[in-house]
Amino acid sequence: MKSFKQIFKEAENKITGIAAAPGIVISKVYLFTKEKLDINDSEILDIEIAIQNFDEALSKSKKELDKIFAIAKEKMDKTRAAIFEAQLMILDDPILIENIKNRVRKEKRQPEYIVNDEISKYQHLMIVAHEQYMNERANDIEDIKNRIIRNLQKKRWQSRITNDLIVVSDSLTPADTILLSRCNVKGFVTDHGGLTSHAAIVSRSLDIPAVVGTHNATKKIKDGDVIIVDGFHGYVIINPTDEQLEFFKTKVDHLAELQKSLKELKDQPAETKDGKEITLLANVDVTGEIDLVITNGAKGIGLYRTEQILEEHGEFPSESEQIKIYTNLATRIYPSPLTIRAFDIGGDKFKFLSFTEPNPFLGLRGIRLLLENEKLFKTQIRAVLQSSVHKNILFMLPMVTTISEIKKSMSIISACKEELRAEKIPFDRNIKIGIMIEVPSAAVMTFELATYTDFISIGTNDLIQYLMAVDRGNDLVSDLYQEFHPSVIRTLHHIIKESARANKTVSICGEMAADTLAIPLLIGMGLPILSLSPTTIPYAKRIIRSISYQKAKTLADECLACSTEKEITEKLERFFTENSITRTRNII
Ligand code: PEP
Ligand code: MG
């Protein structure tokens, strides 16, 4: 059989976009075009009737959204469904509504014109913010604006969609995505939108393969065409040839088989052939992933990146909002552990500072920023403590560089505990506090740092970037971002050994843990816990179950003696062939 590259290199019927939700589907297209609303800006004769129409349109929009919100809550995670709650809040915003009514009275113009003008002003502010997140939210507001206008014009959302089709559209609002998913939509393709667009997030939550940001899908694809959506690579094939069809059908079958066999592993232990048990935990970026954590058989959450909440909310959630989020996760995962990492803001993550730092990765990031903003840090600590009543929460500090940062953090945590005690609010008095080791200075000083904390988690994503002096997101130097560089694996070995010497639990939560090639090496170096993205857990388990711990130890010793990255990768690859282990994750 020809390879993917051979078949698709010159294919003219292929368009590319962003792989937004994994999976492969082949089906007919439903081209979803939203009619453009014409705005009537004529003068009105009867102000009171216009106001009454506006009130009716508002209440109808509210009813529609209530219904969508109810479906969303049923189909998705609560935090995701909150998109619609936010839209409902706009409909209830007294200032906006009064403003619109006052303008209708004063200007004597059609409410639809004023609604369009007023809400567009909000959108404009969001678009000029030049931030991906705000741009996406402007798109959500478009939805609510059009809904009110459509109801003022007394038009209905017409859907001709039948079951089992792939929806191709210019863009999709969260409400569209939810409503369309009720028709058993097989996949989504859009011209616009990025990975963080709600259509993408909703597709991932609903497990519907999606390719977004194709620029021209709606121009190239016609209603009724058959297309293939490859949500792993971000490809769409239009009216595939027999050869392409055969290739993808084989892939779909293969995938189904693989998923079935991986599912069978769910309840099997992650144990090597010679009986060494490894704990597999999950990294969670968005709360919606919790279902995957459970279905993929993780033994708990090893890293919950709370800064992701800020990306979603666009601002800092209050103490009570945070309590809700953390308690929900802790309860759903109970009795397994939930490791909450303090907001890791700065670097390339959530923009917090009003000014730009010359070197954000070396600047006010992680724990440094939190210690500078004690109020914010305390809000999070208080929320984490109050969510810890069931004793399955651990708290972890990011980007630690020195002992003094740990001491300062511990004293803030103690102060928060004292406050809660005085307020008679219950919390886990023995909550475990750990640190991430992702800065070389902390790696060197692991033993000393470990004596001040309860556990250590290695963040290889940053550790490699700081050790090799390569920006983890810069293509120009990506060749130097070497997870198998001898300096990296010797540093990992040092951290593992020193944590054990300090009698502290050590785990890894960087992406390296999900690289199937790295797993025998990590285990051989003595790592007892790996935390990785939920979908990669079954793949890791399969590798662990097919190796011998003794052989992995010998492999690690050999790799630790190497002096180049090439020698190490060759040894690892040889280990896989000699032991006849297939790296299943590469199949897709
Ligand atoms: C890491 O640096 O390895 C890590 C897990 O943290 P993040 O990727 O969130 O920076
Ligand atoms: Mg990091």
Image: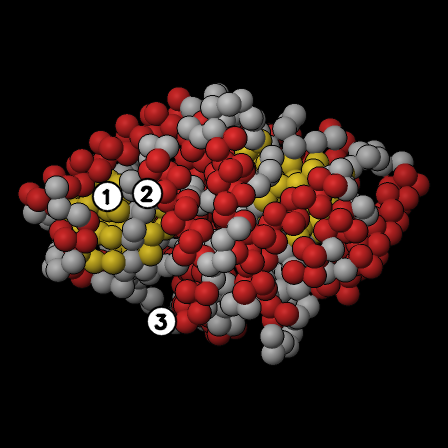
State the CA–CA distance, disc 2 to disc 3: 61 Å
Give above or below for 552 relative to 99: above
Q: Earlier in the sequence, mark 2 or mark 1?
A: 1
Q: Is residue 294 left or right of residue 202?
A: right
Residue 20 location (% of width, % of height): 36, 50
The quarter in which the C terminus is drawn is top left
Foreground label between 2 and 3? 2
Residue drawn 83% across and 50% down?
410
Q: Residues within 10 Å of mark 2 (few under 14, many from 20)?
A: few
Q: Residue 518: image x %, image y %?
A: 47, 44
**Which amino acid is tagged 3?**
Ser
| Disc 3 target residue | 42
Q: Secondary structure at mark 3?
A: loop
Disc 2 + disc 1, Cβ < 8 Å: no
- In the picture of the structure, the residue carrying the numbered disc 1 is 166
Q: Quadrant of residue 406?
A: bottom right
* Tag 1: amino acid: Ile
Quadrant of the image for the N terminus? top left
Mark carried by residue 586? 2
The local secondary structure at tag 2 comes to helix
Instruction: Identify the mark nearer the N-term, 3 or 1.
Output: 3
- How is the model colour-coded? secondary structure
Residue drawn at x 61%, y 47% is 493
